Image (cartoon, helix red, strand yellow):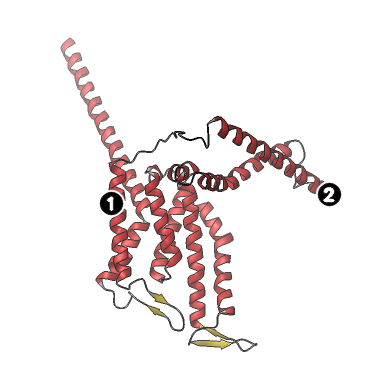
Amino acid sequence: MEDEFSGFHPVINFIYFLFVLIVSMFFTHPVILAIMLFSGMVYSTYLNGWKKTLKFNFLFMLPMLFIVALINPMFNHAGVTILFYLDNGNPITLESIVYGVILAVMLMTVITWFSCYNRIMTSDKFIYLFGRVIPALSLILSMVLRLVPKFKAQLKVITDGQKCIGRDPGSGNIIQRAKNGIHILSIMITWSLENAIDTADSMKARGYGLKGRSAFSIYRFDKRDGGIMALMLMLAMLFAYGIYMGNGFAQYNPVIVINGLSPLTLSSLITFGSALVFAWLPLLINIYYRLKWKYFMRMLSEQKAVSKLHVNRKEALAIDRNC
């Protein structure tokens, strides 16, 4: 689905994902993690579609969530609330179980936001941001990030082509399947080497690495980007204020201590509210532009109806004069 947030300046996109990823990785407060996870899930569904997101969550995310949540209490026995003892005498505590769930949710949140990052922050945006600062590293990172999707797309093309000539790796006996798979792997390796040579020749022809080499860019920081930047900075400052007031503190060992929940204060509402608005910023932008587009289309249809009515009135008057 078309995303309006991806049309903003790469600096806006990068700062947004940098903030949500830092918050998701370094804060263990359950409310903040719930906000980031839910917002990331909704945005990922908007970008990738609900079928793909649901399939990814059920096949990968939920099993990983249960595995991480179960592994932590098996090895971490810290906590004062002992639920039961294992056969080897190690206790299973409530604090270790809760902390395992928090770690699993944190990992799930980070992976979800990285899936959104890969859709919005394309390789050309990354090179635009860091091409002059760290040219070699930015080039390597951009090539690595696009390697897997490009490899998968080419593998599908080659597999479909081999299937048409009866070399499907999924049919025949085991030996024939192995031969077909090795043949496809050989084609992929050859394609990868040829593609690397073509890329190197193209970069050399375009003067990569020469001093004074100019770079083409289609990005321009305009007033719209400046307004979103100001809004993001304001929300980040409000969130930082709430963290400074201690509303983001959460402790799970040896006892569970979570600030900002009881009682709910103005500073805690500011903390959680600013995090929620910041995380929902791309979706709010898409909703705003979609409503704006519908308003313009309605106005255009009304103008067409009025002009058509005006034309019909002129035709009626002309017919009346002729009569």
**x then y, percent, for residue 114:** 49, 55
Q: Compute the Cα span from label 1 to label 2.
A: 63 Å
Q: Nearer the viewer, residue 233 or 285?
A: 233
Q: Is residue 236 left or right of residue 3?
A: left
Helix, strand or loop at label 1? It is helix
Quadrant of res 92: bottom right
Labels 1, 2: front one: 1
Hey, what amino acid is under mark 1? Ala
Q: Residue at x 23, y 21 (%)?
A: 311
Of mark 1 and mark 2, the one earlier in the sequence is 2
Residue 323 in view here: no
Residue 26 in view here: yes
**x then y, percent, for residue 26:** 44, 66
For label 2, count other residues whose C-alpha is less than 10 Å away and answer few (under 14), some (14-19) or many (20+). few
Q: Nearer the viewer, residue 121 or 159?
A: 121
**Does residue 74 sit above or below 68 in this rendering?**
below
Q: Which residue is mark 1?
A: 230
Q: Residue at x 77, y 42 (%)?
A: 183
Q: Nearer the viewer, residue 28 or 38?
A: 28
CB atoms of marks 1 and 2 within 8 Å: no
Q: In the image as oriented, which residue stretches furthest toward the top?
A: 322
**x then y, percent, for residue 303:** 24, 30
Q: Which residue is mark 2?
A: 175
